[in-house]
């Protein structure tokens, strides 16, 4: 396919070469420089680890795994909420020449069994409360070694494994060796294992660091699930820049706000539902959040009105970025002082992008919408055990087709408008659900909203809104209000009031779930 240079958007060049090192080697450069500084704070218990202690635990974890039969290329699956052990085990497995994968700790046995089988995990790290799920999931599989954070019958305790590691194994790991198998969110189908090597992850950490130079004093709240690439990469990023990571098991409003207040958190990575909470919930006024300096939002489209409202309420920098599991996390990010409302920012260094017509695959003019393609050193190696999906996602010349619809303005700022597979086709017109949802969220009676396409004999599809009310709401009145603000083909066929919107742990609307609910309802 021809590549007209005028239509390929370029990020700035990398200021330093990508070193030929593994992820643990890259991070250990910082852990050994900052040995006495605080690295991790477990918010529920108050337990602290210095960078020096963290480095020693990672080495002991690697040695302990090897002592219990973990070999280069073996896979460790982390099935537990966020905690210091999550990161120690992940980096320890990588240092021992293995691969780490994370599973949602809310999974049932069938979902966990599917990922265990797909990954071929030989070791699994969990907590006693999740052991029944683990035992049910592993019943029909080759039995993995089960490691528990606390003592539990029939398992290897994490503490005893660390105690058994007398020396760090001298294992040579190539930078292009497989490092991690995070799973895509599966909003439009079954989750897929995304193969990332050490070079992919190290590249993205360097790209993020160059793009968003942060002040010296940094306290980062690590509440995003570490099984997801967003939470995992930004936890690693915090360590590479010498931040103190305050770790929460999960997002819960009061513990989240208490952690920010108690530990004087300066930096947050959030998803749109959390930013909406920060911008609009009355509980915010009961806490001192004045330490916040920087909030980055990603994982799903965000309306500029909500972005601005959060900025004004919290009195700190609020920016957007764009990324995906297949990019090791980040493709574009807003640089400090270069904010543009509604934009995901500019390409990170060393990255190229283009906007292609989804039907013809030809590049479109600057400013026109189409599917975003990117390539760079952070691009994934393919989908685990799925060559067909890999060939659909990666072109022969290395472009990754993101499945996201957006455009670049004349200055190179990226705007994401929706997912390709989620566009609603009304009488031949393509309607972006995220655009309609952003408008609905400006109504004072709407706390949350999701829009799906419903099959229609005359129009092909019609947009249908599911909304969570703030107090009481008149469905017809909201429908009429909406109709006065959009072109005819974007008007809502129906407004349904519901208790909650189904979402993934990172805040992406699960439209396939909502479509199934809508079909059942009808």
Image (spheres, rainbow, N blue to C red):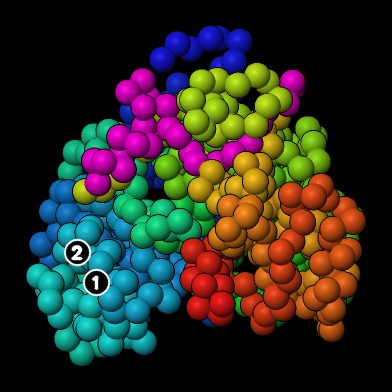
* Residue 212 against residue 179 in the figure, above or below: above
- Which sits in the foreground, 501 or 28? 501
* Residue 30 against residue 114 in the figure, above or below: above
Q: Position of residue 142 (x, y in %)?
A: 9, 70
Q: Is residue 452 left or right of residue 66?
A: right
Q: Bounds of the magenta span? A: 386-412
Residue 113 disc label: 1
Location of the N terminus (image quadrant): top left
Q: Residue at x 71, y 25 (%)?
A: 367
Q: Position of residue 514 (x, y in %)?
A: 55, 69
- What is the secondary structure assignment of the residue under circle 2? helix
- Counting labels gives 2
Local packing at callout 1 (Cα closer than 10 Å; few below 14, some 14-19, many 20+) is many
- Residue 291, quarter of picture: bottom right
Q: Is residue 117 magenta?
A: no
Q: Residue furthest front?
A: 458
Q: Position of residue 419 (x, y in %)?
A: 56, 47
Residue 76 disc label: none
Q: Is residue 400 left or right of residue 487?
A: left
Is any part of residue 264 visible from this angle?
no
Tag 2 residue: 117
- Residue 319, quarter of picture: top right
**How far separated are the C-alphas under marks 2 and 1?**
6 Å
Location of the C terminus (image quadrant): bottom right
Q: Residue at x 17, y 86 (%)?
A: 154
């Amino acid at each position: 396919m021809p590549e007209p240079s005028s239509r390929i958007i370029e990020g700035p060049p990398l200021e330093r070469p990508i070193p030929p090192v593994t992820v643990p080697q890259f991070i250990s450069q910082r852990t050994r420089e900052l040995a006495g500084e605080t690295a991790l704070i477990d918010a529920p218990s108050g337990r602290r680890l210095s960078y020096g202690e963290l480095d020693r635990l990672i080495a002991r974890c690697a040695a302990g795994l090897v002592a219990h039969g973990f070999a280069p290329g073996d896979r460790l699956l982390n099935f537990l909420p966020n905690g210091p052990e999550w990161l120690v085990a992940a980096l320890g497995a990588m240092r021992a020449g293995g691969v780490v994968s994370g599973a949602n700790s809310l999974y049932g046995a069938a979902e966990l069994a599917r990922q265990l089988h797909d990954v071929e995990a030989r070791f699994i790290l969990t907590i006693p409360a999740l052991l029944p799920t683990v035992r049910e999931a592993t019943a029909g599989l080759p039995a993995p070694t089960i490691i528990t954070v606390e003592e539990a019958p029939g398992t290897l305790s994490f503490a005893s494994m660390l105690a058994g590691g007398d020396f760090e194994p001298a294992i040579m790991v190539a930078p292009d060796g497989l490092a991690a198998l995070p799973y895509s969110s599966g909003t439009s189908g079954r989750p897929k294992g995304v193969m990332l090597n050490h070079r992919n992850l190290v590249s993205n950490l360097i790209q993020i660091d160059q793009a968003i130079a942060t002040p010296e004093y940094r306290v980062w709240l690590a509440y995003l699930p570490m099984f997801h690439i967003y939470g995992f990469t930004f936890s690693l990023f915090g360590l590479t820049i010498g931040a103190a990571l305050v770790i929460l098991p999960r997002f819960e409003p009061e513990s989240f706000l208490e952690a920010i207040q108690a530990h004087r958190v300066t930096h947050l990575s959030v998803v749109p539902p959390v930013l909406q909470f920060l911008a609009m919930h009355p509980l915010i006024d009961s806490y001192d959040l004045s330490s916040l300096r920087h909030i980055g939002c990603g994982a799903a489209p965000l309306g500029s009105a909500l972005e601005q409202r959060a900025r004004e309420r919290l009195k700190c920098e609020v920016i957007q970025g764009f990324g995906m599991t297949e990019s090791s996390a980040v493709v574009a990010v807003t640089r400090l002082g270069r904010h543009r409302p509604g934009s995901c920012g500019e390409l990170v260094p060393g990255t190229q992008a283009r906007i292609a017509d989804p039907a013809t695959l030809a590049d479109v003019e600057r400013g026109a919408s189409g599917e975003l393609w990117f390539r760079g050193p952070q691009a994934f190696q393919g989908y685990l055990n799925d060559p067909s999906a890999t060939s659909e996602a990666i072109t022969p010349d290395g472009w990754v087709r993101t499945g996201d619809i957006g455009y670049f303005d004349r200055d190179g700022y990226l705007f994401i408008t929706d997912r390709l597979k989620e566009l609603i086709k009304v009488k031949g017109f393509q309607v972006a659900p995220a655009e309609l949802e952003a408008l609905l969220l400006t109504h004072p009676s709407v706390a949350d909203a999701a829009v799906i396409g419903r099959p229609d004999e005359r129009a092909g599809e019609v947009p249908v809104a599911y909304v969570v009310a703030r107090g009481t709401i008149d469905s017809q009145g909201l429908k009429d209000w909406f109709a006065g603000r959009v072109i005819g083909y974007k008007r809502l066929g129906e407004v349904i009031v519901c208790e909650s919107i189904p979402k993934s742990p990172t805040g992406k609307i699960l439209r396939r779930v909502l479509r199934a609910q809508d079909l059942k309802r009808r």
